[in-house]
Image: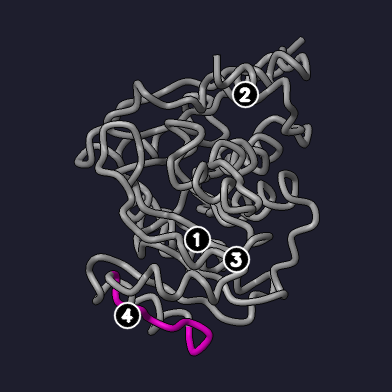
Amino acid sequence: MTLPKVPLAAVIGHPIAHSKSPMLHGHWLKTYGINGHYIPMDVAPDDLETVLRNMHKMGFVGANVTIPHKTRALEIADQVTDRATLIGAANTLIFHEDGKILADNTDGYGFIQNLRQSAPDWDPTAGAAVVLGAGGAARAVVASLLDVGVPEIFITNRTRVRAEQLRDDFGARLKVVEWVQAGDVIEDGTTIVNTTSLGMTGKPELKVSLDGLQPGSLVTDLVYTPLRTPFLDEAAQRGCVSVDGLGMLLHQAAPGFERWFGPRPEVTEDLRRVILG
């Protein structure tokens, strides 16, 4: 009698010890009674392709990739989903039995699901969005906002050329705004998103005037350490709906877990408590 293989998955980064993904997937594996494992793997950039090409031989069915590997993983993969191509980065890999690697990006999915769960009355078509930052996370956010029908996106970044690159890649619904004018354009947005690391523990604060915030607007921060950033606190004080970034981390993990282990996991308050310790 041949025993079934124990499915393995991992999160790969450099460094990786800080990742909450093993705790997250471990909780789901336990909740659904699955005999599988999800481990952190610290892999240097020079070793990434060798590691990825051999993981299926060791019983791995997939992996998450994080900084600094999200762009390189896309280049290594044999197949790439349309959304990963559009975003220009991968965060979720599926290893097929023939050794082929499929790369996907679920960051945008996680972003939208977090907003839908945390702010069920949010209407993305109600007005423009304002996106602070133009890095990899911003690309996923912009792609997902356009997908759900946001009519216009004002994008601003400390380095203007990166914002212009997003406009060139995503089209005419994006308007580039100078970083020093970010506070002025916020009054035109019904959805405001901070995709920068400003405001994160150990980083400089986000110095953008929120005087123009319209009460009832949705304001969200991709930062989740601390869970409530000064940006979110001020938005809440001004009568806005504020959504923290932890839910995006939790929701982006669900499609990968389903592909690797079977069940479609739920993002619950109990899960949030576990991750927050």
Mark 4 → mark 1, Cα distance in angstroms: 16 Å
Mark 1 residue crowding within 10 angstroms, few (<14) / some (14–19) / many (20+): many
Residue that badge 2 annotates: 7
Helix, strand or loop under label 2: loop
Mark 3 → mark 2, Cα distance in angstroms: 48 Å
Please tell me which residue is depicted at 61% across the width and 39% down the height of the picture: 247
Please tell me which residue is depicted at 50% across the width and 58% down the height of the picture: 193
Residue that badge 1 annotates: 140
Q: Is residue 30 visible?
A: yes
Mark 4 → mark 2, Cα distance in angstroms: 43 Å
**Amino acid at pointer 3:** Gln
| Labelled pair 4, 1 in contact (Cβ < 8 Å) | no
Furthest residue in direction top, as rendered: 1
**Amino acid at pointer 2:** Pro
Q: Residue 164 got which mark?
A: 4
Helix, strand or loop under label 1: helix
Mark 3 → mark 4, Cα distance in angstroms: 26 Å
Decide which of tag 4 and tag 1 comes sooner along the chain: 1
